[in-house]
Image (cartoon, rainbow, N blue to C red):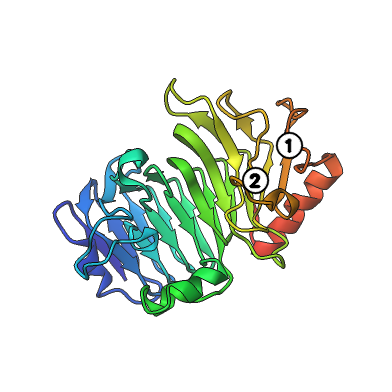
């Protein structure tokens, strides 16, 4: 079944009615809601990515109705648990900006498998996009605090294409195998783009392929491509266009940790001088680049 939501209607009201394989079309408007998509095989299409705005204003130290701080993993504007969910042509925003005032503020929190986002805008500052699952240690720490389904430690394959992701500190983070293809990655202040937290037995983590990494304003001048949120976090940046706001070292080991010994970061770029990259970063040659892309796409069962 196909549902239509007009400006002034509630997305949550419609989500209570949908079943597998239903589609929701959202007309232009601003929708101030906190949304959870728990069912499988749901498709959500906006009228236009700039003018369909789903927005909320939760942030990590905000006191919630249960008298506890919100915590990063309850700040989401939209959470997706269902498998094979597709969203396109809309904006998901957490309006808790700037990060030096509000801290962590997730716009989109994805736990489901085989998730696809096409032609969307994700906008926040710190922790804009969480690509679940949680690192295993946090599934233990937050037992009894987060909802049970948020604590499930299961594989998640995610694809983001032709989309814009806006933030500043660790604004793409988590443990999913996630492809970012032909995306605009916009840093609005100095910080870190990605903070992967993959387990040691995850061969692949994040792949940024043919993305544009750009600065949102002239005050941005010192951004790292990634730092490992957990020991074995892994990310690859291949054939990306990189603006001059990216630190010449490229990557960061995360403060005073020893994660430079365990993190798995890769880069391939014929148009950028990589000679000053951290020595523990893997610079791929042509053959290795092709093999990496092929292996990654096979892992997530996706064709470009």
Q: Give the residue displayed 21% in from the left and 67% down from the top.
A: 67
Q: Is residue 227 above or below residue 212?
A: below
Disc 1: CA contacts within 10 A as few (<14), some (14-19) or many (>=20): some
Q: Is residue 226 above or below residue 43?
A: above
* Marks 2 and 1 close (CB-CB < 8 Å): yes
Q: Give the residue displayed 84% in from the left and 39% down from the top.
A: 285
* Residue 162, percent from left and from top: 51, 43
The residue that label 2 is drawn on is: 253
Disc 2: CA contacts within 10 A as few (<14), some (14-19) or many (>=20): some
| Quadrant position of residue 159 | bottom right
Q: Give the residue displayed 72% in from the left and 40% down from the top.
A: 267
Residue 40 in view here = no
State the SS at label 1. Answer: loop
* Residue 42, percent from left and from top: 39, 68
* Residue 92, percent from left and from top: 34, 50
Residue 303 in view here = yes
Q: Which mark is residue 108?
A: none
Task: Please state, as top left, top right, bottom left or bottom right, where the N terminus lies in the image.
Answer: bottom left
| Quadrant position of residue 301 | bottom right
Most distant residue in the front direction: 256
* Residue 106, percent from left and from top: 38, 53
Q: Which of these two is toward me, 235 or 137?
A: 137
As drawn, is 269 to the left or to the right of 35? right
The residue that label 1 is drawn on is: 278
The mark nearer the N terminus, 2 or 1, is 2
* Mark 2 to mark 1 CA distance (whole Å): 9 Å
As drawn, is 222 to the left or to the right of 35? right
Q: Is residue 117 above or below residue 84?
A: above
């Amino acid at each position: 079944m196909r549902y239509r939501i007009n400006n002034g209607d509630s997305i949550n009201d419609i989500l209570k009615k949908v079943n597998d394989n239903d589609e929701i079309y959202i007309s232009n408007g601003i929708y101030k809601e906190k949304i959870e998509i728990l069912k499988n095989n749901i498709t959500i299409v906006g009228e236009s990515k700039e003018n369909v705005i789903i927005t909320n204003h939760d942030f990590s130290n905000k006191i919630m109705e249960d008298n506890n701080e919100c915590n990063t993993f309850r700040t989401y504007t939209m959470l997706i648990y269902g498998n094979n969910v597709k969203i396109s042509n809309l904006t998901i925003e957490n309006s808790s900006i700037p990060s030096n005032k509000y801290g962590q503020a997730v716009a989109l929190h994805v736990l489901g498998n085989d998730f696809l986002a096409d032609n969307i805008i994700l906008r926040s500052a710190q922790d804009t996009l969480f690509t679940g699952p949680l690192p295993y240690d946090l599934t233990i720490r937050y037992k009894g605090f987060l909802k049970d389904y948020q604590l499930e430690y299961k594989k998640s394959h995610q694809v983001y294409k032709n989309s814009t992701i806006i933030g500043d500190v660790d604004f793409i983070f988590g443990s999913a195998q996630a492809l970012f293809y032909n995306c605009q990655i916009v840093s609005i202040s100095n910080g870190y783009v990605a903070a992967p937290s993959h387990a040691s037995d995850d061969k692949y983590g994040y792949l940024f392929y043919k993305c544009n990494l750009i600065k949102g304003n002239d005050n941005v001048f010192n951004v790292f491509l990634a730092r490992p949120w957990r020991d074995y976090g892994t990310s690859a940046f291949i054939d990306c266009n990189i603006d001059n706001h990216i630190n010449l070292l490229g990557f960061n080991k995360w403060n005073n940790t020893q994660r430079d010994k365990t993190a798995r970061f890769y880069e391939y770029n014929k148009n950028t001088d990589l000679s000053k990259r951290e020595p523990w970063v893997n610079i791929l040659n042509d053959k290795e680049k092709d093999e990496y892309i092929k292996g990654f796409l096979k892992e997530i069962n996706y064709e470009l």
